[in-house]
Image (cartoon, rainbow, N blue to C red):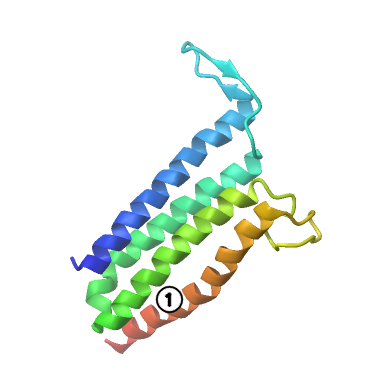
């Protein structure tokens, strides 16, 4: 396995961990704290929404799995080292940008769908932090996945 593939597996696994941790946050919001009977419990208002934590849970799991899946095939599909390195760098950027998006969007009234006011809420710093990296990553990810598809069909 090439260093690029190993790097994708490593970053993908870390993003999966963030997704799994967000699963706990879903429960904390739904239950109003840390409640695991018969263990000691603590009732508190956990920040964010159940919807937002669920989005981070599922989205981060899928982003991490995407990176791991690409790692599994990239060495066999992409011959060119430069293209393999580009795909690895962009996908690494994308999975972390999306993780930041899910986290920050959970604290943005406008769900991080823009840095300014939109149909679902007011703009904020959290909205800007969510939107900016994810918007850039969305476009470059489409481009490098197209490069991956082109390399796959070329073989």
What residue appears at the point 26 percent right and 68 percent down from the top-left corner?
4
User: Which quadrant would residue 18 be assigned to in this image?
Assistant: top left
**21 in relation to 63, above or below:** above
- Closest to the observer, 125 or 131: 125
Quick one: 1 or 109, which is closer to the camera?
A: 109
**Residue 68 seen:** yes
User: How far across and how far down the image is residue 95, in percent?
Assistant: 45, 60
Q: Position of residue 47 (x, y in %)?
A: 64, 35
| Percent coordinates x, y for residue 44 in the rendering | 63, 22
In-image side of 80 versus 63 (left or right): left
Q: Residue furthest front?
A: 125
Q: Residue furthest left?
A: 1
Q: Secondary structure at mark 1?
A: helix
On screen, residue 40 versus residue 91, left or right, reads right
Q: Is residue 62 above or below residue 106?
A: below
Is 125 drawn above or below residue 33 in the view shown? below
Name the spot of residue 128 as percent of width and height, x first: 66, 59
Point 46% across, 13% down: residue: 39
Task: Report the quarter where the N terminus lies.
Answer: bottom left
- For the question of whether residue 111 can be seen, the reply is no
**What's the residue at 59%, 68% (across, down)?**
135
Image quarter of the C terminus: bottom left
Tell which residue pokes out farthest to the bottom in this image. 154
Q: Disc count in the image? A: 1
Residue at 76% x, 57% y: name it. 123
Mark 1: give few (<14), some (14-19) or many (20+) Cα within 10 Å: some
Mark 1, residue position: 145
């Amino acid at each position: 396995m090439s260093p690029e593939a190993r790097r994708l597996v490593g970053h993908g696994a870390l993003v999966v961990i963030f997704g799994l941790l967000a699963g706990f946050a879903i429960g904390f919001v739904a239950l109003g704290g840390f409640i695991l009977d018969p263990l000691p419990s603590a009732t508190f208002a956990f920040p964010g929404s159940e919807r937002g934590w669920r989005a981070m849970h599922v989205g981060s799991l899928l982003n991490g799995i995407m990176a791991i899946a690409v790692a599994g095939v990239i060495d066999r599909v992409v011959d060119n080292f430069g293209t393999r390195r580009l795909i690895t760098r962009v996908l690494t950027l994308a999975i972390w940008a999306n993780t930041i998006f899910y986290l920050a969007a959970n604290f943005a009234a406008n769900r991080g769908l823009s840095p300014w006011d939109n149909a679902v809420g007011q703009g904020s710093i959290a909205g800007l932090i969510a939107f900016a990296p994810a918007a850039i990553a969305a476009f470059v990810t489409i481009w490098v996945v197209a490069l991956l598809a082109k390399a796959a069909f070329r073989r």
